[in-house]
Amino acid sequence: MKTTDHPYQLIVTLYCILPTVYRPLPTAQHPLFLTPSHVRLTFGPMERNIADLKRQFSQVFGEGGKIHVVRAPGRVNLIGEHTDYNDGFVLPVAVEPEITVVFRGRDDGKYRFASTAFPNDLDEFVIDGNIPKRPNHWSNYPRGIAHEFQQAGLTLVGIDALVINTLPVGSGLSSSAALLISSALAMLALTGLKVELPRLAILAHRAENEFIGLPCGIMDQTIIATGRAGFAMLLDCRDLSRSYVAIDPKELRIVIANTMILHSLPGGEYAERRKDCETAVAYFKTIDASVKSLRDVTIPMLEESTGKLPDRPFRRARHVVSEIARTQEAATLLGKRRYEELGEIMLQGHRSLQQDYEVSSPELDCLVEESMKVKGVYGARLTGAGLGGCIVALAQPRAVETLTLHLQKTYNEKFKKVPEIYVTSASAGASMIE
Ligand code: GLA
């Protein structure tokens, strides 16, 4: 199979090795796109047919034994972008597109993982001291979490597991963190051992940073493990405390539009921005020794640094410091149902990501701008790391259809691609289904 046949593999490769590369997402023929339609107005339990999931499992691993199912949602971040690795706040939501893992225990200590996204590419490993990483392979996610469990002293048992997605891979909706968390729940379920969900998020984060080698923050793993149906989560990435803010589905819809440009967390791009933030922190430490991260930098301190800090780290810091403030304000406004003001803050966040953090793209800008032309849309912004992937818009329920059609038409006219649209409510964090 060619390198480009593996979106996970691509993400890893691009993140670590290549400079900025925009790649088109797999086409509608790709196995992840389960319907030919580009509009998916509902997801979740309605689409989850347990008997069918089990049938797919038996086709790969054979009949018999007790078959279980776990699920992990994707995530969309309403605001608080590139703040998690700066000890800031984020406001993500678990979404209905999900990863399910269908599995059965084995008593010979073998771990076998297959994925409908990568047919005929079953991975097998054993846990005997050291779990090797497979170069650029999707199964490094289950391998990585098994490695973390092993490091934590948990004794696992063998497993046959089939991974099935409704969550598109590589679209910036955290399919990798969802794969880590769902694999983790499946492995734990067979042992009867319990790991609290916030701790599971920390282990999954470590697996992604250390085993997989992606220097991401803690947001994705936390919301996927500990999200609540009907709520956004305000996460303090410094002390990992969480509070939940209700999203009333009668008043608000979360609409996600996919640029169909592979979100790849490109190696240079994400890591470079982290470095710029570190450069800024090093400067602020010389002004105030108590500064540990950009979380400790105030707006007056930032203003004071104008002309002293080199331009790029200055603008990165300006984004992070202002975004942390925006995120806290956004959570308050959401709680008070002040949607117009919330929408304005989302737009400010997008502009800051565009101009100061430089992670937007013409495609993302187009989707944001066109969303804002539709009556009943409160706000829109790029979501996730940027440079491809998705935008998120908050809209009145009655605006959803017009918004969907408008985005499809205008984006297609400009970029000759039809964006997939996902309309979702806030879903629950990962769970055992059966
Ligand atoms: C990616 C990372 C997250 C976070 C976002 C940007 O999704 O996985 O940890 O840094 O980018 O907010």
Image (cartoon, rainbow, N blue to C red):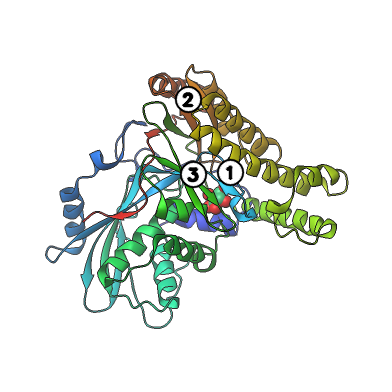
Q: Residues within 10 Å of mark 1 (few under 14, many from 20)?
A: many
> Which residue is disc 3 drawn over?
92
Q: How far apart are labels 3 and 2 at the CA level?
A: 28 Å
Which residue is most to the left?
64
Query: In the structure shown, which secondary structural element does the residue marked by tag 1 occupy?
Result: loop
Q: Position of residue 193 (x, y in %)?
A: 31, 71
The three-letter code of the residue at mark 3 reads: Pro
For marks 3 and 2, the one nearer the N-term is 3
Query: In the structure shown, which secondary structural element does the residue marked by tag 3 occupy?
Result: strand
Mark 1 within 8 Å of ligand 1, using the beta carbon: yes
Q: Is residue 127 above or below residue 360?
A: below
Q: Quadrant of the N terminus?
A: bottom left
Q: Residues within 10 Å of mark 3 (few under 14, many from 20)?
A: many
For marks 3 and 1, the one nearer the N-term is 1
For marks 3 and 2, give the one nearer the viewer: 3
Q: How far apart are labels 3 and 1 at the CA level?
A: 8 Å
Instruction: Identify the residue shown where x is 55% and y is 28%.
Output: 343
Q: Residues within 10 Å of mark 2 (few under 14, many from 20)?
A: few
Which quarter of the figure has residue 332? top right
Q: Position of residue 59 (x, y in %)?
A: 18, 57
Q: In the shown orientation, is residue 317 left or right of residue 50? A: right
Q: Which mark is residue 80?
A: 1
Contact, mark 3 vs mark 1 (Cβ under 8 Å): yes
For marks 1 and 2, give the one nearer the viewer: 1
> Which residue is disc 2 drawn over?
412
